[in-house]
Image (spheres, rainbow, N blue to C red):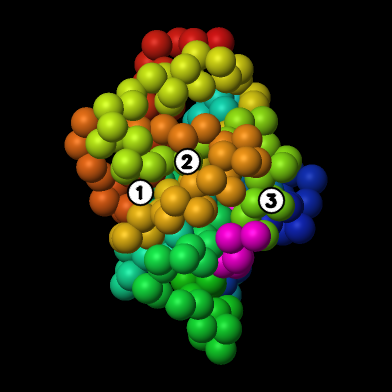
Amino acid sequence: MQRYFVPSTQFSNQELIITGDDAHHINRVMRMDLEDQIICCNDLGESFLCEITKLTNDDVHLLIVEWLKETKELPVNVIIASGLPKGDKLELIIQKATELGCNQFVPFNAARSIAKWDEKKGDKKLDRWVKIAKEAAEQSHRTRIPAIQKPCSFEELIKLSEKFDYKMVAFEEAAKAGEKSQFASLLHTMKPGQSILVVFGPEGGLTEKEIKQLNGQGFVTCGLGPRILRTETAPFYVLSAISYHFELQGVN
């Protein structure tokens, strides 16, 4: 069944109205008709089974039929901080990490980031990232769209890290040295409802200076197995491991 995220302002009692691109998708792409049903999610992560009551060229009117009690989100909040990578790699990270349950994305300018944030094109690029996350959340039947922050400096990332319960940094030198217990230890320590910020470097990795600064702020340096992962692959490894630990093993 098709799923759409609808701002809470478009809900009114037992009715809601969908406008814009989603209305076009329902009308022109899916070619839905009266009495067809879809699932709508609001800003609070609540989802509802809805029935189409009216179709116009500009909007879709729906009646809420049932409030759905869904469990779609990861039991812990995972925040992915990526050193700005080249090309469209961050788009891939946002799309796939959204499917895997990421709660928030924080791109940052690392010392070895080749890609540079262009403020003139920034708003357009941020809008595209938000659209990618929304579509991925709909496709994967999530009840929330991950938040995406405008790229920040390394210093701003350090400041932001203060509000999370756990903090780790994936470091390839730790993997090369055979470190393989810290990540598992963090998972066994974490409880549902807590948050973890995970930092990944860009293509060239993080510098020793950056690692020392992160360690000084309470970040745990972790290896992710014996193989060295690309900057766009490492977040998927972490999210998959977290899902396996908390969801497939039923840890609570």
Residue at figure coordinates x 58%, y 48% from the top left: 213
Quarter of the image where one finds residue 7? bottom right
Q: Residue 163 location, x and y as percent?
A: 73, 41
Q: Which mark is residue 87?
A: none
Q: Is residue 241 visible?
A: yes
> Relative to the observer, which residue lies in front, 23 or 34?
23
- Disc 3 element: helix
Residue interval drawn in magenta: 146-155
Residue at figure coordinates x 51%, y 66% from the top left: 109
Q: Report the side of 82 relative to 92 (left or right).
A: right
Look at label 2 and name its amino acid: Val
Crowd around label 2: few <14 · some 14–19 · many ≥20 (10 Å): many
Where does label 2 land, which residue? 169
- Among numbered discs 1 and 2, the one appearing first in the sequence: 1
Q: CA distance from mark 2 to mark 3?
A: 14 Å
Q: Is residue 249 magenta?
A: no
Image height of 69 relative to 212, above or below: above
Q: Residue 135 location, x and y as percent?
A: 43, 56
Asked if disc 2 and disc 3 are in contact, CB closer than 8 Å, the reply is no
Residue at figure coordinates x 57%, y 19% from the top left: 190
Between marks 1 and 3 in the image, the one whose residue lies nearer the viewer: 3
Residue reaching furthest to the right: 13
Image height of 110 relative to 3, above or below: below
Crowd around label 3: few <14 · some 14–19 · many ≥20 (10 Å): few
Q: Which mark is residue 96?
A: 1
Look at label 3 and name its amino acid: Leu
Image quadrant for the N terminus?
A: top left
Residue at figure coordinates x 32%, y 53% from the top left: 232
Where does label 3 land, which residue? 160
